[in-house]
Image (spheres, grey):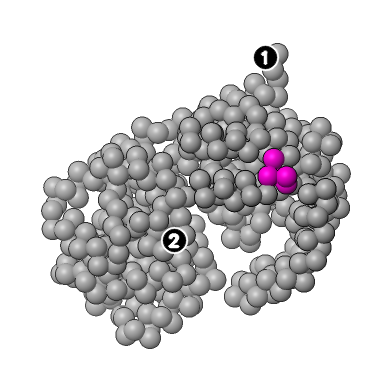
Amino acid sequence: MARFFYSELLYLITPLIWLRLLWRGRKQPEYLQNLRERYGFYRQAAPEKLIWVHAVSVGETRAAQPLIEGLLARWPDHRILLTGMTPTGREAGRQVYGDKVIQVYLPYDYPGAVDRFFRHFSPAFGVLMETEIWPNLLAASKRRKIPVFLVNARLSARSARGYGRFSALARPAFSALSGVAAQTAGDAERIAGLGATAVEVCGNLKFDVTPPADKLALGHEWRAAIGQRPVWLAASTREGEEPLVLEAWRGVAVPDALLVLVPRHPQRFNEVAALLEQQGVATVRRSDGMPANDTQVWLGDSMGEMAAYFALADLAFVGGSLLPLGGQNLIEAAACDCPVVVGPHTFNFKQATEDAIAAGAAERVDSPQMLAATVNRIFGQKIKLAEMRSAAGSFARAHQGAAGMMLALITRWMDPAGR
């Protein structure tokens, strides 16, 4: 009954979903492409043997790489169907996997749409990345006896309370999962508390993602071109954070320091460029070339180059954390041997952030003023900066191995007899 009312609500808010697509399509026209897929209508032919992996957007798409490679090695006669929800995630999939995978959008969670999805593709099993819990999707997979696993699973205490308020809807969805590979013991406990069974702890898959060698080389080329200027990076900043970062920038007293500012979402590149112009900041966009000697901010308006930005930087502030947005992934920075500063709000990466701070690879600040003071202090202590750089790489390497554990679990869950 709860799922019936949930479905009716989805139908009622369909006009709002379309308005949101149109609104996002103003800045990113790709949102208005492949619309039929969002309702379960596909042109792509479906291979007979298929493994389905769902990664909602860019971060999950890139994080899935070591697991997808393991799945292809374990089941070489199967193709991978990679679904997502955003055009940026789809583009990331094209960059990372090329034609090794089939890419489509996962349909919205209408009963008919998810039925059409499963009827068309009929995967052997499905793998959902992180916390993609859709009641009708999981009910349909259970009805069709298609095992679905939730991997690299994370669930904050705040999100768990939210699901708990709708337990009549959430509990059947979580219990429909055939297995869960959680990032941490806390995640496992919260997910099990919502009705999931066969929950095990495997760590964070993002530690297993190797920064692309060509992007690291690109970052080193940038470093050589920029020369000895100190470089601090504000990575994956979210809406409302750029004014705070610029406030901190004005308090940085490091001579000749260059700020590299990379917004999280490409549809905001022009908006952030306009903000920098409005505030009279000498800015060069990545798309326009390299920064000049008098450039104050280099605006990273490119996709798929975050590893290059981390390889360039002496120190990185990882965004989504100065405002209560939960923070972005600091693991990629650590894997590139880049020391990290984060704000007070990191609940999306709670354990990884705490571990990075404990390892000496990261520091936490609670305001733009403290961010400026921390940048000044770390840049003023070359030995400290070198120690943080070394600690970042060691921290990233010490937590690898999740992909192998997850692949072993999926293999065991799919073949309990060990054949």
Q: In which quarter of the image is the C terminus?
A: top right
Q: Main secondary structure of the magenta part?
A: helix
Query: For numbered disc 1, what is the local secondary structure?
Result: loop
Q: In this view, does 411 lie to the left or right of 157?
A: right
Give whichever of discs 2 and 1 has the lower sequence position: 2
In percent of width and height, residue 327 lies at 43, 55
Q: Which mark identifies residue 324?
A: 2
Nearer the observer, 324 or 26: 324
| Dot 1 alpha-carbon crowd within 10 angstroms: few under 14, some 14 to 19, many 20 or more | few
**Dots 2 and 1: beta carbons under 8 Å?**
no
In percent of width and height, residue 91 lies at 60, 58
In percent of width and height, residue 4 lies at 83, 52
Indicate the amino acid at tag 1: Gly
Q: In this view, does 105 lie above or below 244?
A: above
Q: Is residue 374 left or right of residue 162?
A: left
Residue at the disc numbered 1:
418
**Which residue is at a point 59% across and 29% down the rendered structure image?**
199
**Which residue is at a point 50% across and 45% down the rendered structure image?**
157
Can the viewer see residue 317?
Answer: yes
Q: Which mark identifies residue 393?
A: none
Q: In this view, does 102 lie above or below 19?
A: above
**From this viewpoint, which residue is outermost toward the front?**
165
Can the viewer see residue 219?
Answer: no
- CA gap, disc 2 to disc 1? 45 Å
In magenta stretch: residue 317: no
* Span highlighted in magenta in the image: 167-171
Indicate the amino acid at tag 2: Pro
Q: In this view, does 393 lie to the left or right of 127?
A: left
**Which residue is at a point 31% across and 81% down the rendered structure image?**
281
